[in-house]
Image (cartoon, grey):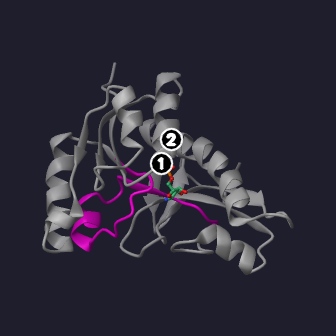
Amino acid sequence: MNDPTRVVVLISGRGSNLRSIIAAMQNGELPVLIAATISNNAHAPGLSHAHAAGIPTTIIDHRHFTGRAEFDQALIREIDRWRPDLVVLAGFMRILGTDFIRHYQGRLMNIHPSLLPALPGLDTHARAIREGHRQHGATVHFVTENVDAGPVILQVAVPVLPEDTAETLAARVLAEEHRLYPRAIRWFAEHRLAIRDGHVLLDGQPVQKCSQ
Ligand code: GRF
């Protein structure tokens, strides 16, 4: 049998996506090994999910470095110690530099709470409501040097309801994120993904945007 795909997950906060990835792994739905979880925030509540699952955790606090390049290099050293096939950003709230992104080209994934290219950046739920979007959602994508703009692997749409607040909309999107991320990671682990001309192929075919 082949060795399982080794994954390192980076978080900064709540870690509910990390929890869903761990759950999928434990249910046998996700053939990966989470080698480590790394956080830039020692107080990230999400670290408890890694602890509960017996996954090693490390803190690389960005405030201990003089600049982004030094932080990124320290992060690379720590990540590579775990020999990952895939690095998963799950609510990791630091912008990563070009050298970091190039180092993990084609094996660095992110989840963003919007239907990219709509609503890159922060506060997506409040902005979706304020700007009158009828649909909102989440996107899993490979990370490239342009923030929130890498090749899309998987998207899911949810309706924006008239009575929605940013909180109710966020909860609807988050429930979908928890299904989306394990699925995208599984495709990677099954070697079904490729990137060609800046677009993701699944089993050699362009991925469907907004697939459920
Ligand atoms: C999620 O909404 C994700 O899309 C975004 O940050 C949030 C992280 O939530 N990148 P959690 O820490 O996984 O609960």
Front-most of residues 60 and 139: 60
Residue shown at the point (41%, 76%) measured from the top left: 146
Task: Say which mark, if any, is on residue 193.
Answer: 1
**At numbered mark 1, what does the secondary structure look like: helix, strand or loop?**
strand
Task: Say which mark, if any, is on residue 149.
Answer: none
Residue 22 visible from this viewpoint: yes
Front-most of residues 10 and 81: 10
Residue shown at the point (70%, 73%) measured from the top left: 128
Q: Which residues are magenta?
A: 87-115
Residue 125, quarter of the rendered image = bottom right
Q: What's the amino acid at mark 2? A: Trp
Residue shown at the point (34%, 70%) measured from the top left: 95
Residue 192 visible from this viewpoint: no
CA gap, disc 1 and disc 2: 6 Å
Task: Name the residue that disc number 2 marks.
Answer: 187
Q: Is mark 1 within 8 Å of ligand 1?
A: no
Q: What's the amino acid at mark 1? A: Leu
Q: Is residue 152 above or below residue 30?
A: below
Residue shown at the point (17%, 49%) measured from the top left: 78
Q: Is residue 23 above or below residue 61?
A: above
Q: Which mark lies nearer to you, 1 or 2?
A: 2
Left or right: 126 as drawn, with respect to 151 = right
Local crowd size for mark 1, using a 10 Å CA cut-off: few (<14), some (14–19), many (≥20): many
Quadrant containing the N terminus in the rendered view? top left
Mark sitting earlier along the chain (1/2): 2
Residue 166, quarter of the rendered image = bottom right
The percent position of residue 107, horizontal first and vertical second, equals 35, 52
Q: Is residue 103 above or below residue 51?
A: below
**At numbered mark 2, what does the secondary structure look like: helix, strand or loop?**
helix
